[in-house]
Amino acid sequence: MSDENKMVEAWIKFNCAGCQRPIRVEDDMGGLEFPCRKCGVVMVIPEKSGMTPEIVSEAPTPKKKTVSMSMSMPRGLGAMKTEVSQKTADSMASTFLGGLLAVVGAIIMGMFMRRGGRA
Ligand SMILES: [Zn+2]
C-alpha cells in the first residue's frame, strides 16, 4: 500500500527554466540534463519538485516554437546569401568602375580635344 503512495510521489515537477512550462519527470532523473522540447533550453533536473532547474545551455532560438526546425536548418541558405551579396557587390563594383572609367575617359578625351583644337 505504501508502495502505491510512493508511485504517486515518484515524480519531480518543476517549471522549465526557459519557457516556464510545467515539466514532470520520474524522480530517478534528478540531476540529469533535460532539454526542453518547447523552448530548447537544456537544464539540470532538480532533485525535488518545485526547485528551479539550473540552466546548462540557453535556447538557440528562444521564440521559435517549431520542433521540426532542427531537421532543416539549411547550410545552403547562408551560402546562397553570401553568393548573392557577393554578386551584388561585384556588379556594383563593376558599375562603379565602369562609371569611373567613363568619366576619366571623358576628361581625357576633353583634354585631348581642347589641345587638339588649340594647337
Ligand atoms: Zn522550455
Image (cartoon, grey):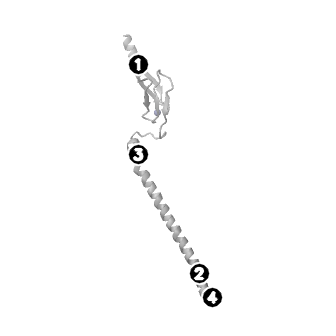
Q: Can you identify the residue that label 2 sits on? A: 110
Q: Are marks 1 and 2 in contact (CB under 8 Å)?
A: no
Q: Nearer the viewer, residue 117 or 85?
A: 117
Q: Earlier in the sequence, mark 3 or mark 2?
A: 3
Between circles 3 and 1, the one closer to the viewer is: 3
Return the mark for residue 44. Answer: none
Q: Earlier in the sequence, mark 2 or mark 4?
A: 2
Q: Residues within 10 Å of mark 3 (few under 14, many from 20)?
A: few
Mark-to-mark CA distance, 3 and 1: 38 Å
Q: Can you identify the residue that label 3 sits on? A: 73
Q: Which secondary structure lies at badge 4?
A: helix
Q: Residue 12 at what x, y percent from top left?
A: 44, 22
Query: Which amino acid lies under the numbered mark 3 shown in the image of this protein?
Result: Met
Q: Can you identify the residue that label 4 sits on? A: 118
Q: Are marks 2 and 4 in contact (CB under 8 Å)?
A: no
Q: Residue 111 at what x, y percent from top left?
A: 60, 81
Q: Can you identify the residue that label 1 sits on? A: 10
